[in-house]
Amino acid sequence: MLKDKNIVLGVTGGIAAYKAADLASKLAQGGAKVTVVMTKSATEFVQPMTFEALTGNPVVTEMFGPQAAHGITHINLADNADAVVIAPATANIIGKIAGGISDDMLTCIVLATKAPVIVCPAMHNNMYVNPITQENIEKLKKRGFHIVPAAHGRLASGDIGYGRLPDTPDLLGHILTVLGRNGDLKGRHVVVSAGGTREPLDPVRYVGNRSSGKMGFAIADAAKERGARVTLVTTITPPVPSFYDGVRMVETVAEMREAVLDACQKADVLVMAAAVSDFRAADISDQKIKKKGDKLTLELVQNADFLLELKDNFIKVGFAAETQDLLPNAQKKLTAKRLDLIVANDVTKEGSGFGTDTNEVTFIGKSGKPEPQPLLTKREVADRILDRVVGLMAKKRR
């Protein structure tokens, strides 16, 4: 999503300017062409050379500097930008933009650009909650600016309150969401499950599995970045919960069933990446089970397959994590669960098991023809899954 995107990163004079260096680095690592525009005050906190080293591009610090001779003007930057990000955004810069003031390079770019502008406020809590600042933020929202809410926590003054610049993953999430809002899943509601369910035996122990949630998070991230409204049903807290439109934390199969059925009432797509327990304890002890001899016998009963309770009026994608007979088992699940697509993987293969950052999968659709994929990162697998989802939706519209 970031590859070949032109990002203007505006850095203003706040202590959180140091965080902008990490953001610039991550944007560049993602393949974006980053042009950093610093206000005069910002250079008092971080040297322009830092951003030049991280992005590989000249840093703009004034309206009429040497860069103007090379076509780096406020109009040039404004016209070529895919997004303008201001991080940190001080109360001063927010007030100037809200008032239409354009007295430096950054404010001129904001006034001239037609690209989305993402404003990330960061300042002391008293300044942030001041009615004037909040009024200016509301003005920007009404004019179509994307505002990243300030985070709560310890401030540079030592006080606790709102005004912190969110961490880089959170900022990247907002940027990617804005960049992808006109993607091929725009206006679609995608429900994704992630993690492994836990079925309690007593207040201490449970029956579970080794799922890390990484595959589900990768799919949810990819869907969000392609313009979808994403509801994540998960047993594991995601790295940036605020990135999604809704997060439902669950533990047992019964809780996941309730959350998925509810979320899917108006869904366009369901991707069941979670590892759902096949069995649960017949009886759950109210107290911790104590040792009674050398053996413990447990009675397990099978969990019902709640996917069969869902209607067939939207796209359903499932996973088959197997250790043997991969394709026959996956094809059986595809039919039994009435899925449109199943993603099969042999978890005993190197780089393809639980907790890895890669996966080697095979897609099987209703035609029954296996489509083996090479070893890919889980994010790459996620994009390939969603490519097929987009194709399936196109067929349903015909």
Image: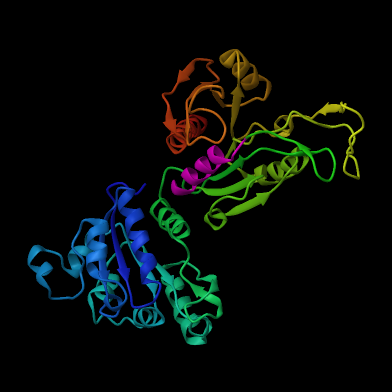
**Helix, strand or loop for the magenta stretch, by majority:** helix
In this view, the residue farthest toward the left is: 69
- 347 lies above or below 128: above
Please, which colouring scheme is shown?
rainbow
Residue 297 picture location, percent across and down: 88, 26
Q: Answer whether residue 78 is visible to the viewer in this image.
A: no
Residue at 32% over, 56% down: 25
Given residues 189 and 84, the one toward you in this image is 84
Q: Is residue 191 left or right of residue 77?
A: right
Could you say which quadrant of the image residue 20 lies in?
bottom left
- 192 lies above or below 330: below
Residue 298 picture location, percent across and down: 86, 28
Q: Is residue 112 left or right of residue 321?
A: left
- 326 lies above or below 52: above
Q: Answer whether residue 216 is visible to the viewer in this image.
A: yes
In this figure, what is the number of numbered marks?
Answer: 0
Given residues 314 and 22, the one toward you in this image is 22
Residue bounds of the magenta highlight: 211-227
Residue 384 picture location, percent across and down: 44, 32
Residue at 41% over, 57% down: 175
**Is residue 220 found inside the magenta-colored segment of the image?**
yes
Residue 347 picture location, percent across and down: 56, 24
Q: Is residue 64 left or right of residue 15?
A: left
Given residues 284 and 38, the one toward you in this image is 284
**Is residue 287 found inside the magenta-colored segment of the image?**
no
Residue at 51% over, 40% down: 219
